[in-house]
Amino acid sequence: MTRARILAPLVLAAVIIAVGAFGAFRAYELRTTPAAQNEAVVDASTTAEVQAFISQGLVQVLTYDFANPDATTSAAEQVLAGDARKEYDQLFDDLAARAPGQQLVLNARVQSVAVTELDGDTAEALVFLDQTSQRATDQEATISAAQLSITATREGGTWTITGLDTL
């Protein structure tokens, strides 16, 4: 038997092992990238659940009618928690003081919700929304657009907005 015939299977085995090891390393590397670990990219049902919650929740808490402020307050109790609730309370305390005199009505409409990160029970989202305001005292209406950075947290199966920042 020649030396080449003996070495050929050994070289072939070494090449196969090297290619297999490289493939295993690349597969591991791809699974551990931030995009692969972001559940917003791979868990469509939870991402859709978060989008729906944020969209509905923001409409409820950012829509306000001077004649029925309790609806907004009640929604805030269910939808907001933590820093988001504190910031909301400061904003709407001022609004509640001015709204009856102006007969102010606000309507919010979420244009888009993009869940940028989902990690277990915490989600980060970017929200684009429009808010129209109507004052009965002078029939003046305005429309404003807003971009928000939202943090939502799930506790006991229920999502709440815990972070609310204007961009």
Image (cartoon, rainbow, N blue to C red):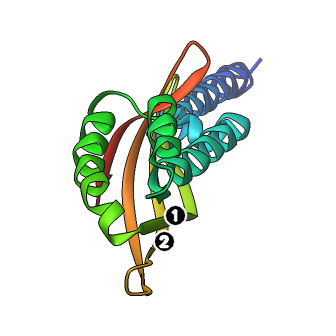
Q: Which mark is residue 56?
A: none
Q: Is residue 78 above or below residue 143?
A: above
Residue in view at x 45 percent, y 30 percent: 77
The answer to which of 96 and 39 lies nearer the viewer is: 96
Residue in view at x 71 percent, y 18 percent: 6
Are there few (<14), some (14-19), or many (20+) residues within 10 Å of tag 1?
many
Q: Is residue 139 above or below residue 10?
A: below
Q: Position of residue 29 (x, y in %)?
A: 49, 33
The answer to which of 39 and 53 lies nearer the viewer is: 53
Query: Tags 1 and 2 in contact by the CB under 8 Å rule?
Result: yes
Kind of residue indicated by mark 2: Asp
Quickly name the residue at label 1.
108
Residue in view at x 63 percent, y 41 percent: 47
- CA gap, disc 1 and disc 2: 6 Å
Quickly name the residue at label 2.
130
The answer to which of 84 and 90 lies nearer the viewer is: 90
Q: Quadrant of the N terminus?
A: top right
Kind of residue indicated by mark 1: Ala
Residue in view at x 48 percent, y 41 percent: 70
